[in-house]
């Protein structure tokens, strides 16, 4: 039986808010017919540009109308969906009067996602500082937030034109950087100094009891970024709350081609129909989305000596296997035929065999597990 599950299904309220967001977008960010007709091409271009043609983009691309409309109508809502799934499963109890910083906030995506997915926070007085080098997208996000939460929301949102390492005035209870750190240069030898500089900055900007949540896109490069940031944060006195069930070396640090990188794929169940349709128009239909992340504090999480499932299950001789993570390193959970495997992101307390075997292909330590339930 698992004791924790990342990315649980969305609540009915969260699903309804995501659906409602389509109407809010139309009202706050109306598109002329000719721009609406062209939207699918702009989305496709931007999707390509956010992955392969990164270097051709100018630094403040998010203030450029060519990028802002596709971002607001397609990338922002998908990020709201991804973050809603994450926030639903994380322990995210920000105290009344708390300070939250969102770095590289774009259209204040993380703030909107928090409001949608954590209704118990809606009545708290929370102070958000959103920082991005492109102010236009933050302004658009603010309008969307106000249309959604109403003008009498107790949330105070300040937007600041700034780069990642600019001074943060008040120490934070929570710092979030979502889908943003990958815009820095992480090539070759820059990886470690980049992580050192950012970690120092985050540490100095955080209250003693504060938490840091770095969310990324789930691709190989961001696997490397998260692993490097994790390593630096651990060296600086932080411990993982999630997803890592241990404080030893990362078992999936994305070191080289073909090497495993820690990321989670999950379904798009509960994503709004209007967004699925728009994705289809742009030839970017989705069955699933992916994410990698690290959530740390000085105290860290409580469940150590547990195993976290990471990959989707796959067929192996005699049943199914699933790459997972434990304090013993990369772990291959093995389910016998006829048993339902766990979903990616579940945590369970293992019963290790006296002499665990090693999987020859991956080098993972193997862990026989009975799975969720016997299939009827
Ligand atoms: C892909 S968007 C992510 C926006 C938002 N966090 C989200 O998840 O939807 C990346 C954002 O990072 C910002 N950004 C990139 N490099 C930055 C830097 N060095 N300092 C501050 N912001 C930066 C960009 O302007 C952009 O708004």
Image: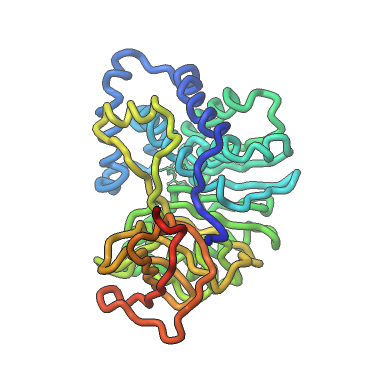
The answer to whether any part of residue 194 appears in the image is no
Q: Position of residue 141 (x, y in %)?
A: 52, 31
- Is 251 placed above or below 269 here? below
- Is 191 placed above or below 150 here? below
Residue 349 location, quadrant = bottom right
Q: How many marks?
A: 0
Pick the residue in front: 143 or 358: 358
Ligand 1 sits in which quadrant?
top left
Q: Position of residue 280 (x, y in %)?
A: 28, 30
Q: Position of residue 320 (x, y in %)?
A: 32, 63
Q: Residue furthest top?
A: 33
Q: Is residue 318 left or right of residue 89?
A: left
Residue 222 location, quadrant = bottom left
Residue sitting at 67 percent across and 49 percent down?
Answer: 93
Residue sitting at 56 percent across and 50 percent down?
Answer: 89
Q: Residue furthest front?
A: 376
Q: Position of residue 184 (x, y in %)?
A: 39, 54
Pick the residue in front: 328 or 53: 328
- Is 369 placed above or below 171 here? below
- Is 356 placed above or below 319 here? below
Q: Is residue 49 left or right of residue 347?
A: left
Pick the residue in front: 200 or 333: 333
Residue sitting at 47 percent across and 33 percent down?
Answer: 137
Q: Tell me, what colour scheme is on the image?
A: rainbow
Residue sitting at 28 percent across and 18 percent down?
Answer: 37
The answer to whether any part of residue 181 appears in the image is yes
């Amino acid at each position: 039986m698992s004791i924790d599950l990342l990315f649980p299904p969305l609540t009915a309220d969260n699903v309804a808010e995501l659906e409602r967001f389509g109407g809010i977008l139309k009202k706050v960010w109306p598109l002329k017919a000719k721009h609406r007709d062209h939207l699918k091409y702009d989305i496709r271009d931007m999707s390509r540009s956010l992955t392969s043609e990164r270097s051709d983009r100018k630094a403040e691309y998010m203030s450029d109308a060519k990028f802002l409309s596709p971002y607001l109508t397609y990338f922002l809502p998908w990020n709201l969906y991804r973050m809603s799934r994450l926030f639903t499963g994380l322990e995210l109890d920000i105290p009344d009067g708390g300070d939250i910083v969102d770095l590289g906030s774009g259209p204040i995506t993380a703030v909107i996602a928090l409001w949608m997915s954590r209704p118990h926070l809606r009545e708290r007085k929370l102070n958000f500082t959103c920082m991005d080098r492109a102010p236009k997208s933050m302004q658009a996000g603010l309008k969307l937030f106000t249309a959604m939460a109403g003008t009498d929301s107790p949330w105070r949102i300040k937007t600041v034109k700034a780069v990642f390492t600019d001074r943060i005035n008040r120490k934070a209870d929570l710092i979030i950087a979502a889908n943003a750190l990958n815009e820095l240069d992480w090539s070759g030898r820059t990886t470690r100094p980049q992580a050192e500089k950012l970690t120092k900055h985050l540490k100095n900007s955080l209250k003693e009891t504060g938490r840091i949540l770095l969310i990324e896109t789930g691709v190989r490069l961001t696997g490397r970024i998260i692993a490097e940031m994790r390593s630096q944060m651990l060296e600086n006195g932080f411990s993982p709350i999630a997803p890592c069930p241990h404080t030893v070396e990362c078992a999936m640090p994305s070191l080289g081609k073909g090497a495993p990188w820690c990321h989670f794929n999950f379904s798009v169940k509960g994503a709004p129909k209007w967004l699925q349709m728009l994705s289809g128009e742009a030839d970017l239909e989705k069955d699933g989305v992916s994410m990698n992340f690290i959530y740390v504090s000085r105290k860290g999480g409580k469940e150590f000596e547990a195993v976290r499932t990471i990959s989707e299950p796959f067929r192996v001789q005699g049943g199914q296997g699933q790459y997972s993570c434990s304090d013993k390193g990369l772990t291959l959970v093995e389910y016998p035929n006829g048993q339902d495997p766990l979903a990616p992101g579940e945590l369970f307390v293992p019963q290790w065999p006296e002499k665990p075997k090693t999987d020859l292909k991956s080098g993972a330590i193997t862990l026989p597990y009975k799975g969720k339930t016997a299939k009827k």
